[in-house]
Image (cartoon, coloured by chain):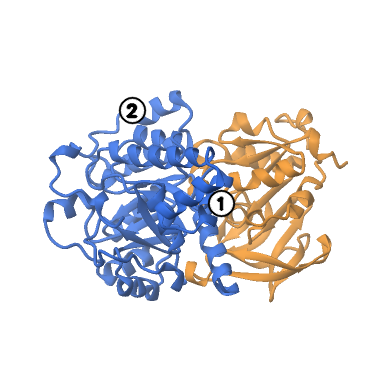
Amino acid sequence: MSNEEQERRKINRGFAEMLKNGVIMDVTTADQAKIAEDAGACAVMALEMVPSDIRKSHRVARMSDPAVIEQIMATVSIPVMAKVRIGHFVEARILEALGVDFVDESEVLSPADEEFHVDKRQFTVPFVCGCRNLGEALRRIDEGAAMIRTKGEAGTGNVVEAVRHMRAVNREIAALQEMDEAELNRTAEAYRVPAALVAETRELGRLPVVNFAAGGIATPADAAMMMALGCDGIFVGSGIFKSEKPAVTAAAIVEAVIHFQDPKKLAEISRGLGAPMIGLEIESLETKMAARGV
Amino acid sequence: MTSSASNQTVGLLGLQGAFQDHIPHLEALGARWRTVRDAAELEQVDRLIIPGGESTVMARYLKRFSLAEPLRARIEQGMPVWGVCAGSILLAKTVDGRPGILGALSIRILRNAYGRQVDSFQAVLDVPALSLSAFPAVFIRAPKIVEAGDRVEALSWFGKDPVFVRSRSVMATTFHPELGSDPIFHQYFLALPNRAPREFSAPGLPG
């Protein structure tokens, strides 16, 4: 890795550190972005449709219109992220040219490449990618992701998949501690990543980059539970603007992340928020987004 | 009146951002630490780090959790405080032309003045006060200090911009020493004189 690449990695991983203990919210308009910023979002994800609407549309979902993204960038002072299809390196170049602060290579959009993810090391802009387990997480980090999030199951308002994925990552990192060098090397081979990256993860006892929870978080209690499971922060997609009172729900989720260890405060925070987004059972889904891009 | 690192507790403002990143440095120096999320927890600490993160989020919850006033009072009484990046925005007297939330440091600061994340950079700095030359400093969507008051000492510069400043026991860095492995900035912070030991800093008493 060149000095320049190493420096950019440090700057981009460092930026992800600054987002920690915060909530990143999906927004589709400048007005929503303002609501999210005022409620205490540490960043917004600019997109044309939230995942629950993408799910209903049954259409190919692509990068958002740059005009939508630019309008949101012009409205808020907090960082703005945007999504590209898995493997779509040209959409990623477009977002980089727009100056977005983070690119989410996301299974919520329709995959563009079933074989390769974007080679993220070639970019200046940082990337966040989804994972269901440690192998996926380390492959994305090896490709250059500066941040990881659980995939969960986006647009469902059902936290069960996010929990499954966070527990899988935790369990697989714990399992590394028991391994001798030969087992570690075999694991690296199975994960298709360099052994040094697996060894680094074992040493740290956690992922070497910031890890957020995403995909189905709909209530302050969901957010606090994911923090208690050890994630560094939260993405909320449809959970805010598909709820009855978006501004109130947004602020409550931010407060729940701050006070996730304090059940009395969580009780106060959860009181009288109106109806959360309607949740879907995972068995009822036609499309499992989490299975995209392994 | 410098107290040694071991008999004081450093607070980490824990509303949002990279507060955990300071823990290894503080532990390497033998300092106790605790997170601060409300006024009662602020009472438990002798000095405070306001970490990097999003200043809008921290400002909102400083107000909402009634922390801004007691924090301002503690700083006025002489509690040492270090603002990192977003933290320097919270400490500033003027932010983007408007009064800052704590107003504890006589600087005029502009948010995101070096650009967006693609413009974030690493620069090598000289810091004579710490006998550092060519220190690699990471600037992340950094704010720019465009003016510093008479009693504010600039301890390092990036071009024409002060990036490490101090006024009495209030210090600010617009870059992120906590992302490196050298605890030298933490050591400097721990040595800042505490003019108001905790036991004498009850509200109403002069600092």
Comparing B207 with B168, the one in front is B168
Comparing A67 with B90, the one in front is A67
Task: Identify the residue position indicated by label 2 in the image.
Answer: A271
Where does residue A216 sit, x and y in percent of width and height? Answer: 28, 42
Q: Residue furthest top?
A: A264
Give chain A's shade: blue
Residue at image coords 80%, 33% = B7
- Quadrant for the N terminus of chain A in the image: bottom right
Q: Which residue lies furthest to the front in this view?
A: A182
Residue at image coords 84%, 39% = B4
Where does residue A203 sit, x and y in percent of width and height? Answer: 59, 46
Element assignment for label 1: helix
Question: Which mark identifies residue A200?
Answer: 1
Q: In this view, does B88 lie to the left or right of B184?
A: left
Question: Which is nearer the N-term, disc 1 or disc 2?
Answer: 1
> The numbered mark 2 sits on a residue in which chain?
A
